[in-house]
Amino acid sequence: MSGLAILGTGRCLPSRCVTNQELSRMVDTSDEWIAARTGIRQRYLSTPEETLTGQAAQAARLAMERAGVTPDQIGLVVAGTFTPDHASPSLACEVHGELGLDSTTPAFDVNAACTGFLTALETARCFLESSSLEGKIALVIGAEQVSRVLNMEDRSTCVLFGDGAGAALVRLSPDHPYTCRLGCRGSAEILRVGGLASPDHWVRMDGKAVFRFATTTVPQALEDLAAQAGTTLDQVDWVVCHQANGRIIDHVIKKLGADPARFYKNIHRYANTSSASIILALDEMAREGLLQPGQKVACVGFGAGLTWGATLLTW
Ligand code: ACO
């Protein structure tokens, strides 16, 4: 299997930042409750004028600028999302149109809920191995407007999520070892979002069951990932967990007996942005100069499905 290099990243957040205090004027909650249970302090929520396509395309443009990549070099667009602007065409197709990509460049979405970005990344890597995409670069997006499926009267869910879009440009590279593991439990019972066949399109969640799933699956996935890559977690420079809840990340650190300083957290700023959370974190870390060439970065996601995924990247 070839390695995978990340050439550049970008992100775009909605214009409206909503703090816990503001939320507590709309629904019966408080900054203390939200911060203590989750670590969240604020989130960005899209206005009706802000489309997910516009946000994802803006993230992609930034990634292209930083990577020095031109539209003709992009041979594939894969977007991880479950909240595209339209059920069809896909978000990836709409971004393709916004960027004016070539008509020989395929574009499609993958829906793996909060594991969306890692699933899109692995899908892109597999496609880049095919002869028709030899030498090409893939645009991989993780983007959500979770606010579209939030019941703002349900305090047990509406305080947990936010919107955001991130993008990465990637190409095969033998100098950038890459390992990935993906899985799914095949269950809609403890976490789901309505859909075309359902009149109820809100997020429904058994929070305690999701907590248990995450705190058992994530440590195991990280250990198995390291073993598959022929390394140990001690040798990994950074761990980027899907930002669903700061307490989940704390439990994972404790279970692994790991160094908390190597686990990146930004949930206080963005809440849970589902497919976008890992690429938002990677882009933020890159901008802050935390990621250095050659560093090993383990990313781990989990979400409705119940899906999970773990990826070891070489920055
Ligand atoms: N503000 C104030 N009180 C609240 C709120 C709120 N926003 N939401 C619930 N409560 C109340 C409940 O009504 C309940 O009150 P009661 O005891 O009088 O009945 C009390 O707080 C405790 O509610 P629980 O649901 O038991 O709270 P819990 O300690 O389980 O915390 C939470 C809830 C934060 C959702 C937790 O279960 C959790 O973190 N689960 C993980 C799920 C998660 O992170 N999901 C993210 C999306 S899924 C994904 O990304 C994969």
Image (cartoon, rainbow, N blue to C red):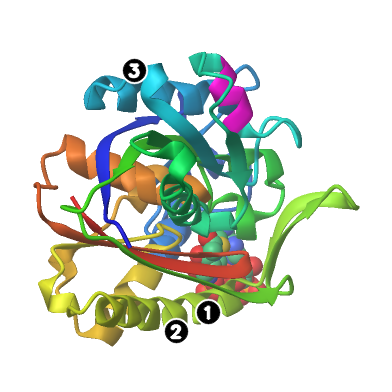
Cβ–Cβ under 8 Å for marks 3 and 2: no
Is the residue 62 above or below the residue 135 in the image? above
* Disc 2: which residue: 216
> Which-is-in-front pick, marks 3 and 1?
3
Asked if one can make out residue 88 in the rendered structure from this viewpoint, the answer is yes
Is ligand 1 within 8 Å of the beta carbon of the residue shown at mark 1? yes
Instruction: Give the main secondary structure, helix, strand or loop, of the magenta stretch.
Output: helix
State how far apart marks 1 and 2 are (Cα).
Answer: 6 Å
Magenta highlight on residue 283: no
| Relative image position of residue 58 (x, y in whole percent) | 43, 21
Dot 3 amino acid type = Thr
* Disc 3: which residue: 70
Asked if one can make out residue 19 in the rendered structure from this viewpoint, the answer is no
* Disc 1: which residue: 213
Cβ–Cβ under 8 Å for marks 1 and 2: yes
Dot 1 amino acid type = Phe
